[in-house]
Image: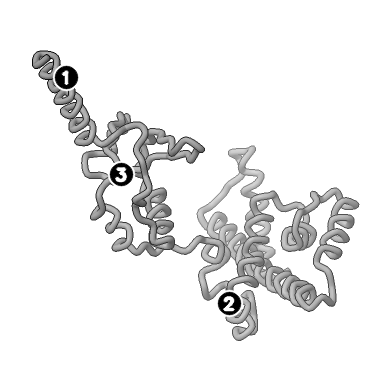
Amino acid sequence: MNKTTNKVAKSDLNIQKAIVSMDVKVSYKDIYKTVEVLREKGTTAVRHLYEVMNDVYTVYSLIQKRDEQKLLKSKTIKQRLNKLADEKNIEKSSNIETALVRYVFGGLERRQVSKYAIAIKNAYKLHAKEIEESGDFAEWLKEIGGLTKLNSKPKIQVRNETFDKLFEQKPLATVKFDLGNNNVSNDDVCLLVCKKTQDGILVYGVDTNDDRVLASSKQAIANNETSNSNNWTVIEGENKKVAQLKAKLKSLQDEMLEFEKEAV
């Protein structure tokens, strides 16, 4: 341990005592020195984490490549790691990436295990060539912004022109719903939930115009070039104009019957 570390360690010890005793003197200098030591420990821990993650990724890549070439079975390795984990009272895993992370890092909580495992899987599945060209997983990971950036879902690129074409078509029906949501105003796009049955489509009122939900729906529509079908028959919630025409037609039919009766 170097001289600086000794001084800070002593200062840190004074602060620990000061927590339970106001008689222990603690200066600003003691605080600053302690923070510096913690910073050194923290940066060392992060650096070490990246180094270990680099090695875990390398092993995972090796296993996956050998598995693809049918030279090794990742399932067999996962089972062995689970057996070793069980002997050390470590939770078993359902896939090879989680088994590797959980066994290597020991007592990490589930959320962290999942974060590291997903990062390794995504890196190999989506960026293996980039990482291979980079020559170092840890350096590549730092360059792209770390684990959180790697695990983040890409923003949905929506082709709005395809979605907007829906509103150029004739509506299937006009249905009145009390959405019960003050956030949904006239001319806002909102969603309804439909359930397909043998008798037709059942429509349920939903009060959401959540941006994320709409973005996902727009993407689905754009990808599938979805449009209104000519094969629809509105069973309930008929178009208001159609209903009015039917009412007029019935009224005319009733008048004709009355006229025929009078003529006889």
* Eye-nearest disc, 2 or 3: 3
**Amino acid on which disc 2 is placed:** Trp
**Amino acid on which disc 3 is placed:** Leu
Q: Which residue is mark 1?
A: 257
Question: Mark 2 and mark 1: span between their CA atoms?
Answer: 84 Å
Q: Any mark on residue 150, and which?
A: none
Question: Which residue occupies the foreground of this view, 6 or 94?
Answer: 94
Left or right, 71 with reference to 6: right
Q: Quarter holding the N terminus? A: bottom right
Question: What is the x, y in percent for residue 51?
Answer: 69, 72
Question: What is the x, y in percent for residue 192?
Answer: 38, 40
Question: Which residue occupies the foreground of this view, 77 or 47?
Answer: 77
Category of crowding for the residue at label 1, using alpha-carbon neighbours closer than 10 angstroms: few (below 14), some (14–19), many (at least 20): few
* Eye-nearest disc, 3 or 1: 1
Do we see residue 82 in this rendering?
Answer: yes
Badge 3 or badge 1: first in the primary sequence: 3
Residue that appears at 67% across and 61% down: 117
Determine whether label 2 and label 1 are within 8 Å by CB.
no
Residue that appears at 34% across and 51% down: 230
Badge 2 or badge 1: first in the primary sequence: 2
Question: Mark 2 and mark 3: span between their CA atoms?
Answer: 51 Å
Category of crowding for the residue at label 2, using alpha-carbon neighbours closer than 10 angstroms: few (below 14), some (14–19), many (at least 20): some
Badge 2 or badge 3: first in the primary sequence: 2
Question: Which residue occupies the foreground of this view, 41 or 8?
Answer: 41
Note whether 249 is above or below 84 in the view shown.
above
Q: Quadrant of residue 3?
A: bottom right
Q: Quarter holding the C terminus? A: top left
Q: Which residue is mark 3?
A: 172
Note whether 3 is above or below 224 in the view shown.
below
Q: Which residue is mark 2?
A: 140
Secondary element under disc 3, as helix, strand or loop, is: loop
Left or right, 183 with reference to 112: left
